[in-house]
Amino acid sequence: MKKLLVSLLAGAMTLAVAGGGFAQDKVTMQLKWVTQAQFAGYFVAKDKGFYTEENLDVEIKPGGPDIAPEQVIAGGGADVITTWMAAALAARERGVPLVNIAQPFKSSGLLLTCLKETGITSPADFKGKTLGVWFFGNEYPFYAWMAKLGLPTDGSADGVEVLKQGFNVDPLVQKQAACISTMTYNEYGQVLDAGFSPDDLVVFNYRDQGVGMLEDGLYVLEDKLKDPAFVDKMVRFVRATMKGWEYARANPDEAAQIVIDNDETGAQTLAHQRYMMGEINKLTEGSTGALDEADYAQTVQTLLSAVSPDNPAITKEPTGAFTHEITDKL
């Protein structure tokens, strides 16, 4: 009987090896937005087998205008999400206990892009103008900035008119707004593609205005971190992910093609993804995956400096909103 058991175990091991090993640990990831180079590191890690090397089977779920990653993970639809820190902290204060476990993006890419012909040359010229703003968690940096400038956002003569902007550049092209929200790696390029030159524009980077906030971090639910097996899985996930981002920086054209290959909608173009990849690589440069606590503190203090009905992100200092437990084990 003992020889039979040994024989059966040996046969099972042989089959496991032949089939590529034992069952991989499943990880479901929810992206903040649609498939594009903003998330290239994850697609590269999957395409190049970095997740497989860590014994992980990773499903990457694209986002969209009707998908809030914070709600997806709260409902059990994902193990890990990528989102902006302001949105994550806002969700945490409202009862979704998100914890930042890694920060692949070192720098922020949010811009306010304005038409020079409107007479805007500095933030002092915003008064009386219509400004396009993204919502669904993306509005918090804008309201913090307006509070810092002392500008009401109620459309009064002494303030600014807020246009709830779709995720496109139409309000600027159609001159419905003097300025619109853009990202360095996406919509700014779309503005240029629409026929404007850099000389036609005045661009303000939120980071340069002292209201930059951390973007595209990795978040999980706090209770999950009590499970050692889950922690181990996230260590392997983050390690492979950062390897994916390193590869993307070293091979931007290949990374752009990998993004295109994973875009089931066919909506993206290779030329634009290459542009995006070049800009995205500037934002991930210098990140080891570990959250910089000074950057975290700046994000928190910026949000707290603008507590008002217009800026409902957070009303008190968060506790337990990040951990180094994962990145310390990379």
Image: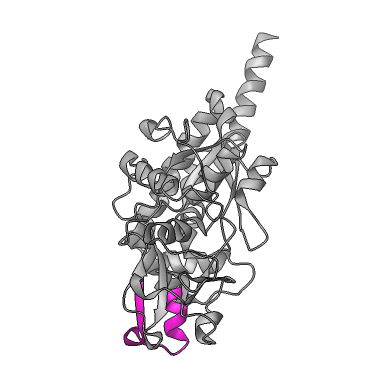
Residue 43 horizontal/vertical position (percent): 51, 57
Name the quadrant containing residue 98. top right
Residue 20 coordinates in the image, percent (x, y): 57, 41
**28 displayed left or right of 314:** right
Q: Which residue is depicted at the point 33% across and 83% down?
A: 198
Between 230 and 13, the one nearer to me in the picture: 230
Q: Position of residue 25 (x, y in %)?
A: 59, 36
Please state which of residues 98 and 330 is positioned toward the viewer in this rendering.
98
Residue 177 visible in the shown view: yes
Which residue occupies 56% across, 47% down?
81
Q: Is residue 49 visible?
A: no
Q: Is residue 8 left or right of residue 236?
A: right
Q: Which residues are magenta?
A: 187-203
Is residue 200 rendered magenta in the image?
yes
For the N terminus, the quadrant is: top right
Residue 242 position in % (x across, y down):
40, 47
